[in-house]
Image: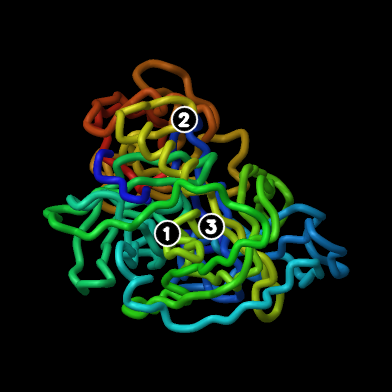
């Protein structure tokens, strides 16, 4: 990435919640939510045009209120958009002391609004991104695009919108790289390579509230460095930890995810990623250090495909399972227009094999599909509700962003 400067939920779902099958080699739907009582897509970042899924609470810096999430845990509610989230507000020593205002013209340069369609039209979500190259390489959080089937990016300084594709993701570190279609001559963000210190003044800029068009800027200071937060769903399961985070007392809000955290010189020192919340304003925020985020982006751009980095989007069959489908590969639904639908699979059918490899649970199906890429062909065997066995060869397609 030679142009770096500086010296970078599905919302409302049917009951019971459903989940597309995706390869287990990449953890799906485990994301960090930016705080707020706004309706969010899977994970944070996005403000979903859909359903409120409860408050999010980080309680690692003080004593949580009764009923809130355990100390150190960031709760984003049911990851499929049907939970209530943590019920407590928590208390801590990082109460936001800065102000929130409209971002200046200078603070808007190299920043984009990201709007996504989630799970083939089930909901929409919104977040923020940072322009890394003049031809449209964008750095953002993985959870901003998680589950997205369509991504539209608007360059704030020009108002021009582009369709975007996922270059790659690192779900464990919550980093994603997008590529804008047909972009050229974009002004890039200025990235900082100086050391960040506790007490430094900062400004978190982003698409707060997911309204688009006008960015907001929340001022504050660096509270702590090298912080760890644990994300989980409301039951405490599916935990995933982010480490090395910059903690700030700026009032980061839902929709800011993926946006720049500026230092006093107006250079990007971090990627806005998470914040605590209660019934009112956020109390502490967290950002991925820009050096770490760019290093991951470089690995993605180099074509690395590993246990942590996913190139592009995963192969997609298009079958769905309810959360209570453990121990069974009986599907609850089929995505319209998907390879599964074209093959004739229907709700109630039970998948038994992929290319001859036995499948007996939703998880084993995910594992079997993990070795395939979009465009690969696979022979699917299933038994319908009458007990009749069927087989069909399908061509897997690119699925929702991971």
Q: Nearer the viewer, residue 382 or 324?
A: 324
Mark 1 Cα within 10 Å, few/some/many (few <14, many 20+)? many
Q: Secondary structure at mark 2?
A: helix
Give the left or right position of residue 62, taking residue 180 as reference. Answer: right
Between discs 2 and 1, the one toward the N terminus: 1
Image point 28% across, 39% down: which residue? 1
Q: Quadrant of residue 260?
A: bottom left
Image point 51% across, 59% down: which residue? 272
Mark 2 Cα within 10 Å, few/some/many (few <14, many 20+)? many
Give the left or right position of residue 271, taking residue 166 as reference. Answer: right
For residue 365, the mark is 2
Q: Secondary structure at mark 3?
A: strand
Disc 2 to disc 1, how far (Cα)?
46 Å
Residue that mark 3 sits on: 273
Residue that mark 1 sits on: 267
Between discs 1 and 3, the one toward the N terminus: 1
Q: Residue 60 at x, y = what percent?
A: 78, 56
Dot in front, 3 or 2: 3
């Amino acid at each position: 990435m030679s142009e770096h400067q500086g010296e970078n939920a599905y919302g409302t779902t049917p009951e019971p919640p459903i989940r597309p099958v995706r390869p287990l080699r990449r953890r799906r739907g485990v994301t960090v939510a930016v705080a707020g009582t706004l309706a969010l897509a899977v994970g944070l970042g996005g403000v979903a045009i859909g359903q409120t899924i409860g408050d999010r609470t980080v309680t690692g810096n003080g004593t949580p209120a009764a009923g809130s999430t355990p100390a150190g845990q960031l709760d984003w509610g049911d990851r499929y958009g049907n939970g209530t989230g943590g019920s407590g507000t928590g208390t801590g020593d990082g109460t936001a002391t800065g102000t929130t205002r409209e971002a200046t013209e200078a603070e808007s340069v190299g920043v984009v609004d990201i709007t996504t369609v989630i799970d083939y039209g089930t909901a929409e979500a919104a977040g923020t991104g940072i322009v890394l190259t003049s031809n449209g390489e964008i750095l953002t959080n993985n959870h901003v695009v998680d589950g997205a089937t369509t991504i539209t990016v608007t360059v704030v300084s020009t108002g021009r919108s582009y369709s975007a594709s996922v270059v790659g993701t690192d779900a464990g570190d919550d980093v994603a790289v997008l590529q804008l279609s047909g972009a050229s001559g974009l002004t890039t963000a200025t990235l900082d390579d100086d050391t960040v210190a506790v007490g430094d003044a900062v400004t978190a800029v982003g698409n707060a509230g997911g309204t688009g068009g006008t960015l907001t800027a929340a001022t504050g200071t660096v509270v702590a460095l090298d912080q760890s937060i644990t994300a989980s769903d409301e039951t405490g399961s599916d935990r995933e930890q982010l480490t090395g985070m910059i903690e700030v007392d700026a009032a980061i809000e839902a929709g800011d995810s993926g946006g720049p955290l500026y230092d006093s010189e107006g250079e990007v020192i971090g990627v806005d990623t998470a914040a605590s919340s209660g019934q009112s304003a956020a109390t502490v925020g967290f950002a991925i250090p820009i050096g770490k985020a760019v290093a991951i982006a470089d690995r993605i751009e180099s074509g690395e495909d590993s246990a942590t980095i996913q190139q592009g989007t995963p192969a997609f069959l298009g079958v769905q399972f309810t959360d209570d489908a453990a121990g069974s590969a009986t599907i609850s639904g089929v995505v319209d227009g998907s390879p599964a639908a074209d093959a004739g699979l229907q709700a109630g059918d039970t998948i038994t094999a992929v290319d001859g490899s036995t499948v007996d649970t939703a998880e084993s199906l995910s594992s079997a599909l993990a070795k395939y890429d979009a465009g690969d062909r696979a022979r699917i065997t299933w038994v319908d509700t009458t007990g009749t066995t069927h087989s069909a060869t399908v061509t897997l397609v690119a699925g929702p962003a991971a």
